[in-house]
Image: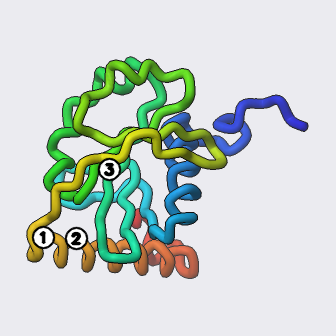
Amino acid sequence: MDSTPLHTQLHTQPGQILARGVCRHLLSHDFACLEEYVPARGLRVDVMALGPKGELWVIECKSSRADFLSDGKWQGYLGWADRFFWAVDATFPQEILPEGTGLMVADGYDAEILRMAPETRLAPARRSAITRKFARTAALRLQSLRDPLRFPEV
């Protein structure tokens, strides 16, 4: 077995490794996920998840204390999801994460929800707009796999 860290093997950043485990876990709960999703201009969430009943979750992946402390934007994501979670690895100092948010512990292969985020239901108009944008983004990303020259930055 290769002892090289997973993020080195896959040429990805630690937060992307966490996102992969989060997406795998949420798929087991019938959620569809998009990584690095832009719900509105100026915002980019690590994972946006669309559940089987239309619920929308935002998951921010933090690989270190410094990564968390340097993120001043996360409260701007709260208005774009029914639930907001942090995803961290098992060594992350969880006590620094704000109360009233969800918590997942993840690695590159899976995740576990340790604390369910409180639900704040989106307004119907915003839910509809985000769901349509989620669908279009997913379709364009899929199409870009077939024609990468036509869609270089989806």
Q: Is residue 77 above or below residue 99?
A: below
Q: Which type of secondary structure does the marked residue at label 2 adopt?
A: helix
Look at the numbered discs 2 and 3 and tell me whether their residues touch, using CB distance below 8 Å.
no
Q: Which residue is mark 2?
A: 130
Look at the numbered discs 3 and 1 and tell me whether their residues touch, using CB distance below 8 Å.
no
Residue in front for this viewpoint, 81 or 130: 81
**Residue type pointed to by label 2:** Ile
**Residue type pointed to by label 3:** Val
Which one is in front in this view, the residue at disc 3 or the one at disc 1?
A: 1
x, y (%) of residue 106?
55, 40
Q: Which type of secondary structure does the marked residue at label 1 adopt?
A: helix
Disc 1: CA contacts within 10 A as few (<14), some (14-19) or many (>=20): few
Look at the numbered discs 1 and 2 and tell me whether their residues touch, using CB distance below 8 Å.
yes
Side (left or right) of 139 relative to 6: left
**C-alpha separation, residue under disc 2 versus residue under disc 3:** 13 Å
**C-alpha separation, residue under disc 3 versus residue under disc 1:** 16 Å
Image point 29% across, 23% down: which residue? 70
Side (left or right) of 16 relative to 131: right
Q: Is residue 41 above or below residue 29?
A: above
Image point 54% across, 31% down: which residue? 89
Side (left or right) of 137 relative to 30: left
Q: For residue 51, which quarter of the picture?
A: bottom left
x, y (%) of residue 56?
29, 64
Q: Which residue is mark 3?
A: 45
Disc 2: CA contacts within 10 A as few (<14), some (14-19) or many (>=20): many
**Residue type pointed to by label 1:** Arg
Q: Which residue is mark 1?
A: 126
